[in-house]
Image (cartoon, helix red, strand yellow):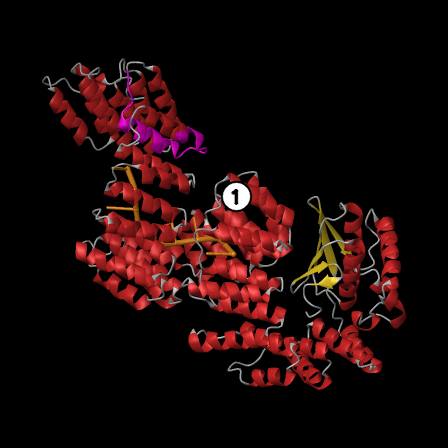
DNA sequence: ATAGGGTTAG
């Protein structure tokens, strides 16, 4: 408002020339200073001089005086295209892209003005900050019409625009069709690919750039390094490093920081440390990179020490410094440290930074302190999308999928989900087996052009596999141009889940053929597949390759899986021998698996031994008592079986109630054993009775012996017939069209009787029935189950 | 015009 009365601000002086006024504008470093200059401009009669006003407007934007700049422009009688450009850029740089665009439209109404390459470049940059891509695409088309499509400035802006809207293919097409490409254009493509998680592609483009002899600059190197870091491709990163050394910008501050981050992320913390020591005066960002490097390599002490150093050197600590210090990647055992950091943040006020509270929320969630996490989330004054994502993912990881989904729905009223939200919620869908919700998310992915995001597509594969749609998972897998280890792992474990052992092994070999390095998870997926398909020799070989060829140390899960493979195949003695070779003490998972195998092969001696270990290690878990009791029943040793059930009763151990879910038209229906609460209950029981009759004719009889354990003998047959699986299937038969698939999900393992019954039902009704239980998938068709009655 | 560190994810 100080523009209204300017006369008081300036003393009358000698008449200034235009050049003198221009230099005054350049030198003005504060707003009052500039307004004084403005007064002088008016006094000297230069208020309608284009060059002077343009420069003044530019300066006003530099000093973030947006309303003043706007006022100056709108009171100016005849702006030229250059002045328009200044305004369009100014608004765009000051977070008002919509003002830029309306100014651009305003400009188009002046028939005497012709937009130039700067106009388009600035307007397109502004459009990339809008919520919708349409405006940018229109501008792109208009720039082509005006013959500016091949202009380098315009081209860079267009490429950047498409990347910002995840239109990776569009961006690449524009780039490919540019007749001339300079370093900045190449850099823009590399940056865009990295931002869209196309790390491999960005490295490839970098390679093309080198091959074509395009001059690199430090920006090129600084942008491509994070791609190598993210892929943990140390050798690629080192190749880039040596190139930088040859070209003379290895010691550029941006490059150095990128290298520190590269080595840290590839686990070479000592190299990162010595690079850091090379920097004589590290800036804050270099410190941040080093602190976070220590943290993610579990060198918590070094991290804290460096942080203290930053504090002592009177450098201002920023939120990202703290974020790097928070032990997100290695939270275990750091609850106390996390609380201390939180204390520091509260005292210093840094807690109000969303990134800080989000990182703290994550650590609490990873330490299973869900309530502490939720409290932090609730107390955050500004809830960013990342904060919501952190909390939703925390719920998902802690098995609280229903809370995750309701929080997601709450979030949707404020935000539109980003790739992180989508991967998280897909993981919740996978856990729940919520196929139709997952499909809905898939549509969302398509509408947001996020199919090329490797996290998203991998999560989709995982979701489809875990929700029973293995073919859809495979189609997605085949359509992906870029895959990483996790993608392969997801597909392999999907095959394992469905009992397709040979497909899993085939894929594993393909993966090796393509040069991917298998991880511990890869081997677990392969072993799991072997166990579900009864592939003993293959499992054996895989385990040995993992240890001897790939040098991966097996975890308890790997051992348990091997015990499962041997045990299921009836090689119980070998399984026992295998356990004795374990370098770590076998835990409940290992003995539990062995007990399960004893159950299948009716080996009482080893079962007794395994259960003794289990009761000792894990007395609260009721599952083992059930298994042992069942074994005695099979052995016709009913008194012993009953005595074990007594123990369970006396210690008030509760068995997880079995329940089955079926989704019809997107609505979930949950059944428990003997359930009569469903609105279709009468029809369901009538259907079951009809089916049971037909099944008996075909030779079915209830497997009363092993199905039940804590129920009196006379109740057994009655209850077996109303297991939740059967209720859900009967309901599915009633409400779905003939010949359609029926999919159900059981929270525990499907029992033998239900398994047999489902085979009969699939034959009688000519339906494909897909059952997901706690362990795997069973595909029933024409009286046969894909698991070969071996699960 | 492009640029290094940091939060949320498979």
Residue pictured at 36% horizontal, 59% vertical = A292
Residue pictured at 45% horizontal, 33% vertical = A132
- Residue on which disc 1 sits: A445
Give the quadrant of residue A775. bottom right
Question: Residue A554 at what x, y percent from top left?
Answer: 50, 75
Is residue A647 among the parts visible in the rendering? no
Up the image or down, A174 lies above or below A353; here it is above
| Bounds of the magenta segment | A113-137
Is residue A761 among the parts visible in the rendering? yes
> Which sits in the foreground, A586 or A224?
A224
> Which sits in the foreground, A474 or A632?
A474
Chain of the residue on which disc 1 is drawn: A
Residue pictured at 71% horizontal, 76% vertical = A600
Up the image or down, A166 lies above or below A630; here it is above
SS at mark 1? helix
User: Would you say residue A513 sits in the magenta stretch?
Assistant: no
Give the quadrant of residue A188. top left
> Which sits in the foreground, A286 or A718?
A718
Residue pictured at 38% horizontal, 26% vertical = A101
The rendered magenta stretch, by its main secondary structure, is classed as helix
> Which sits in the foreground, A396 or A729?
A729
């Amino acid at each position: 408002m100080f523009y209204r009365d300017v006369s008081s601000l300036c003393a009358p002086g000698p008449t200034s020339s235009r050049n003198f006024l221009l230099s005054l504008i350049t030198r003005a470093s504060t707003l009052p200073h500039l307004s004084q200059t403005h007064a002088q401009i008016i006094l000297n009669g230069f208020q309608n001089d284009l060059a002077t006003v343009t420069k003044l407007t530019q300066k006003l934007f530099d000093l973030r005086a947006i309303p003043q700049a706007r006022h100056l422009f709108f009171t100016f009688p005849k702006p030229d295209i250059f002045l328009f450009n200044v305004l369009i850029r100014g608004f765009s740089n000051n977070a008002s892209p919509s003002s830029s665009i309306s100014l651009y439209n305003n400009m188009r109404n002046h028939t005497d003005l012709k937009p130039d390459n700067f106009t388009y470049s600035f307007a397109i940059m502004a459009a990339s900050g809008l919520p919708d891509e349409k405006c940018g695409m229109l501008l792109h088309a208009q720039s082509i019409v005006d013959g500016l499509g091949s202009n380098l400035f315009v081209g860079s802006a267009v490429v950047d625009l498409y990347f910002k809207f995840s239109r990776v293919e569009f961006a690449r097409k524009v780039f490919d069709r540019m007749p001339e490409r300079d370093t900045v254009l190449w850099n823009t493509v590399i940056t865009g690919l990295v931002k869209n998680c196309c790390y491999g592609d960005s490295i490839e483009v970098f390679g093309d750039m080198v091959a074509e002899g395009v001059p690199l600059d430090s920006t090129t190197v600084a942008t491509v390094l994070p791609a190598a870091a993210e892929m943990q491709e140390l050798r690629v990163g080192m190749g880039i490093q040596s190139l930088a050394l040859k070209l003379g910008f290895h010691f550029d501050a941006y490059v150095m920081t990128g290298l520190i981050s590269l080595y840290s992320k590839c686990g070479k913390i000592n190299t990162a440390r010595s690079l850091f020591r090379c920097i004589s005066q590290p800036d804050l960002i270099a410190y941040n990179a080093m602190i976070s490097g220590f943290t993610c390599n579990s060198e918590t002490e070094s991290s804290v020490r460096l942080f203290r150093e930053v504090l002592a050197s009177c450098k201002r600590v920023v939120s990202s410094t703290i974020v790097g210090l928070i032990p997100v990647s290695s939270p275990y055992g750091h609850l106390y440290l996390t609380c201390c950091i939180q204390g520091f943040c509260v005292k210093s006020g840094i807690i109000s930074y969303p990134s800080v509270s989000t990182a703290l929320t994550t650590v609490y969630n990873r330490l299973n302190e869900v309530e502490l996490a939720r409290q932090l989330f609730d107390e955050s004054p500004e809830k960013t999308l990342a904060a919501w994502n952190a909390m939703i993912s925390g719920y998902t990881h802690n098995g609280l999928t229903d809370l995750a989904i309701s929080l997601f729905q709450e979030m949707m009223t404020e935000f539109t989900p980003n790739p992180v939200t989508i991967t998280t919620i897909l993981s919740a869908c996978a856990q729940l087996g919520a196929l139709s919700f997952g499909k809905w998310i898939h549509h969302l992915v398509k509408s947001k052009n996020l199919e090329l995001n490797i996290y998203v597509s991998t999560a989709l594969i995982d979701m489809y596999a875990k929700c029973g749609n293995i073919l859809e998972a495979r189609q997605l897998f085949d359509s992906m141009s870029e895959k990483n280890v996790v993608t392969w792992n997801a597909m392999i474990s999907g095959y394992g889940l469905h009992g397709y052992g040979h497909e899993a092994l085939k894929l594993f070999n393909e993966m090796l053929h393509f040069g991917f390095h298998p991880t511990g998870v890869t081997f677990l997926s392969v072993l799991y597949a072997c166990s579900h398909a009864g592939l003993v020799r293959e499992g054996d070989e895989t385990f040995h390759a993992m240890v001897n060829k790939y040098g991966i140390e097996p975890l308890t899960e790997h051992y348990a899986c091997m015990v499962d493979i041997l045990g299921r195949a009836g090689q119980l003695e070998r399984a026992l021998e295998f356990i004795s070779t374990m370098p770590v003490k076998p835990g409940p998972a290992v003995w539990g698996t062995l007990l399960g195998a004893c159950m299948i092969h009716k080996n009482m001696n080893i079962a007794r031994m395994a259960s003794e270990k289990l009761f000792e290690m894990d007395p609260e878990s009721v599952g083992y008592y059930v298994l042992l009791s069942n074994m005695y029943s099979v052995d016709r040793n009913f008194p012993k079986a009953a005595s074990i059930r007594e123990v369970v009763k006396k210690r008030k151990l509760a068995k997880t109630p079995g329940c089955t879910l079926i989704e019809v038209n997107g609505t979930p229906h949950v059944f428990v054993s003997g359930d009569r609460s469903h609105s279709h209950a009468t029809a369901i029981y009538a259907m079951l009775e009809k089916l049971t009759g037909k099944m008996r004719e075909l030779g079915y009889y209830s497997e009363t012996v092993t199905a039940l354990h804590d129920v009196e003998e006379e109740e057994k047959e009655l209850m077996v017939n109303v297991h939740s699986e059967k209720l859900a299937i009967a309901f599915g038969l009633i409400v779905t069209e003939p010949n359609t698939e029926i999919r159900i999900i059981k929270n525990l393992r499907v029992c033998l009787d239900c398994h047999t019954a489902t085979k009969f039902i699939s034959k009688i009704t000519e339906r494909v029935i897909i059952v997901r239980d706690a362990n795997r998938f069973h595909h029933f068709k024409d009286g046969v189950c894909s698991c070969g009655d071996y699960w």
